[in-house]
Image (spheres, helix red, strand yellow):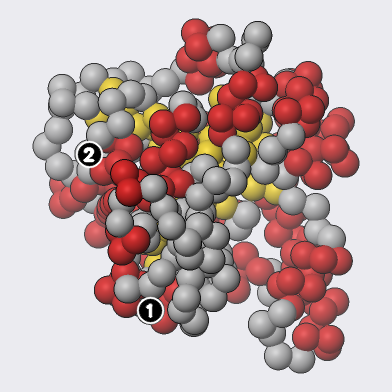
Amino acid sequence: MSELAQNREPAGSLRLAPPVSLEMTTLHAPSPADPLDLGETASRSGRRARIFAHRGASGMFPEHTRAAYRRAIEEGADGLEIDLHLTSDGEPVCFHDATVDRTSNGTGSVADLSLAHMRTLDVTSWKTPKLPGDYGAGNAQLMTLADVLELMIDAGRDLELAVELKHPSPFGDLLETKVLRTLLRFGWDPETSVIPAGEFGQHAVTVSFMSFYPGSLLYLADMVAPDKLCALVSSVTEVQVQKRLERMPLAIAVRPVVAAVMRGTLRDSEALIWNGRVGIAGPGLAYVKDHRAEIKAWVARGSRLRVWTVDDPQDAALLIDIGVQEITTNHPARLLQAVTPGG
């Protein structure tokens, strides 16, 4: 059985669940601004590529915290990139790992912890023991999707939000459903993928959805246009296989199976890009360097390229030469300077 099939079975088929109807969950809000033409916007700003802050300004502050997100917006990032898991009580929360051990003083799986419990965790001291006071108190640093949307809507300018759905998830496609419900509460328009922002709706938060798991993107395709879907791809290495096996029993015995499943998932994601089922290709930097012909072909076919995680200005220059339009980085200020002529 493929990893895609294993991941989707617990929650049923890939069809969008009825509870996500617009009538039930959409707030009354001003008509959003026209969706951003990303190429034109980058051109108007004089930048050769758009810059997404990877987990916020995570090179400076702890990843996925209020401080990291606020800093990225202040530095002028075009958008934020966030990772979402569900808590035990079904709240989409910004966390990269499936467990809280690496980036907090807690332990255990995000899926086993309630939001109230996660709010009690120290998610900053592992990197920054003392945050600047104007970036919020320590107990206000854990961020949910709703917290991020509030922050972006109040930013006073157009922004983009790149949402990564983290799989495999014990909740199956309930993760996608909960994310869509939250977006709809904030006035998200599925047709344009825009949330109106600003006092009079003069600004916009434009949302795109990303995943390494094709099933997540196929599920979302019932409601989201292809140009707002991003297939993340990364070469399958021995290091990645070993990392996937870390929490598995009988790791040595299942290693060949796990490696084969990972390679199959990669092929499925690449197929979504080649077939135009998604409009954004999201390769890692190492993948780009190893597959330049494919990258150039995707650009030539009209795909948008969003490459992660790029912190070296020389790498940014290479990507721009290839035709990459969007770059994800831990250091938004540094990369903004690199992609701005005369910066």
Quarter of the picture containing the C terminus is top right
Q: Residue at x 27, y 35 (%)?
A: 153
Q: Which amino acid, mark 1?
A: Leu
Residue 172 at x, y percent in the picture: 47, 69
Instruction: Please give the residue where the numbered disc 1 appears in the rendered image.
Output: 113
**Quadrant housing residue 158:** top left
Q: Secondary structure at mark 1?
A: loop
Percent x, y of residue 235: 80, 52
Residue 176 at least partly seen: no
Q: Are marks 1 and 2 in contact (CB under 8 Å)?
A: no
45 to the left or right of 315: left
Q: Is residue 101 above or below residue 211?
A: below
Element under label 2?
Answer: loop
Task: Using the image as rendered, state which of residue 126 and residue 250 is in the foreground.
Answer: 126
- Which residue occupies 64% across, 47% down? 232
Q: Which residue: 42% across, 44% down?
A: 69
Could you tell me if residue 153 is visible in this image? yes
Near-viewer residue (207 or 260)? 207
Quick one: 122 or 48, which is closer to the camera? 122
Q: Please state if 210 lies on the left or on the right of 220 as rendered.
A: right
Tell me if residue 4 comes above or below residue 231 in the rendering: below
Residue on which the image places disc 2: 187
Residue at position x 82%, y 79% from top? 255
